[in-house]
Amino acid sequence: MIGNTENEALEDEVITNYKKVENKIKAAAKRAGRDFNEINILPVSKNQDFNKISKLKEVGIDSFGESRVQELLDKEEEKPGFVNWHFIGHLQRNKVKYLARLDNCRLIHSLDSPRLAREINKRARKNGRVIPVLVQINIAGDDNKYGFSKVDFLDVFPELWKLENLDIRGLMTILPHFDNPEKTRPYFKELRNLKEDLNSNGYEISELSMGMTNDYEVAVEEGATYVRIGREIFGEREYE
Ligand SMILES: *Cc1c(COP(=O)(O)O)cnc(C)c1O
């Protein structure tokens, strides 16, 4: 059993960890000649309970990433409206309605099919809102990952763009694990190039959600505007 003081120490550690991540991101931004302020750190709170989330909230961090709808809803029920949520996992169409109702669900990073896009659009309209989303691209062509292939994406993008209750803000990717983070660089570059191609065709999208604990410094050097960090901030997950 963990005593109270030990618990508190663990919770303070989460702030120390966050600051370390922030410093590494500042350094990476500097190396790339980027403005640190355009990079959003999204702590990923999946498999973590509320104590550490609350600690971060105390120092002004108010948006967290979750990858399972049920877990997000359980946490929301525990403290309604306490923080903002970003949904980052694979989203089943029959669960979209639960997220669409939550005004504090601010961004869905993982739009990965035209049918899901139409469902989010429909539920957003029913709730009288426009839901911000990122389109997930399987840029490394990994069989185990969700997301559009680049070719499919370019085919369907104009159709997605027309959906009135979707606000497509950018692109997201999840890469396979590489022991050497340098190996991720070509994929991050490719995602940025895809965004720039869309921009030069008149589509105004600005966000790139890329980079996790293993590879976020490279992602920042290559243009990430959101990095999704779980383990380096929270430590190993408390439950699976
Ligand atoms: C869990 C998760 C993360 C965070 O991963 P870490 O390796 O713990 O930083 C980021 N993005 C998605 C989609 C995840 O599911």
Image (tube, grey):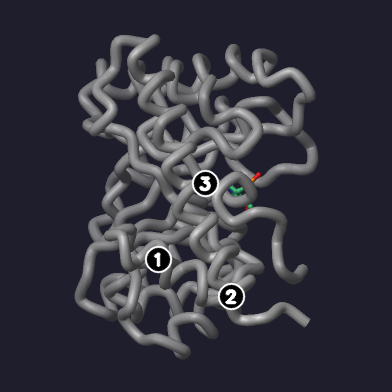
Q: Nearer the viewer, mark 2 or mark 3?
A: 2
Identify the amino acid type marked 3.
Asn
Q: CA distance from mark 1 to mark 3?
A: 20 Å
Q: Where is residue 7, by image quadrant?
A: bottom right
Seen in the picture, residue 157 relative to 106 is either above or below; the reply is above
Q: Where is residue 40, by image quadrant?
A: top left
- Residue beneath disc 1: 85
- Which is more N-terminal, label 3 or label 2? 2
Tell which of 179 and 132 is nearer to you: 179
- Which is more N-terminal, label 1 or label 2? 2
Q: Quadrant of the C terminus?
A: bottom right
Tell which of 60 and 40 is nearer to you: 60
Q: Nearer the viewer, mark 1 or mark 3?
A: 3
Q: Where is residue 37, by image quadrant?
A: top left
Contact between marks 1 and 3 (CB within 8 A): the answer is no
**In the figure, is residue 143 to the left or right of 204?**
right
Contact between marks 2 and 3 (CB within 8 A): the answer is no
Residue drawn at (26%, 79%) of the image:
127
**Numbered badge on residue 17:** 3
- Residue beneath disc 2: 5
Q: Position of residue 181 (x, y in %)?
A: 67, 20
Seen in the picture, residue 212 relative to 186 is either above or below; the reply is below
Secondary structure beneath dot 1 equals strand
Identify the amino acid type marked 2.
Thr
Q: Position of residue 82 (x, y in %)?
A: 33, 78
For the residue with label 1, is its CB less than 8 Å from the closest atom of ligand 1? no
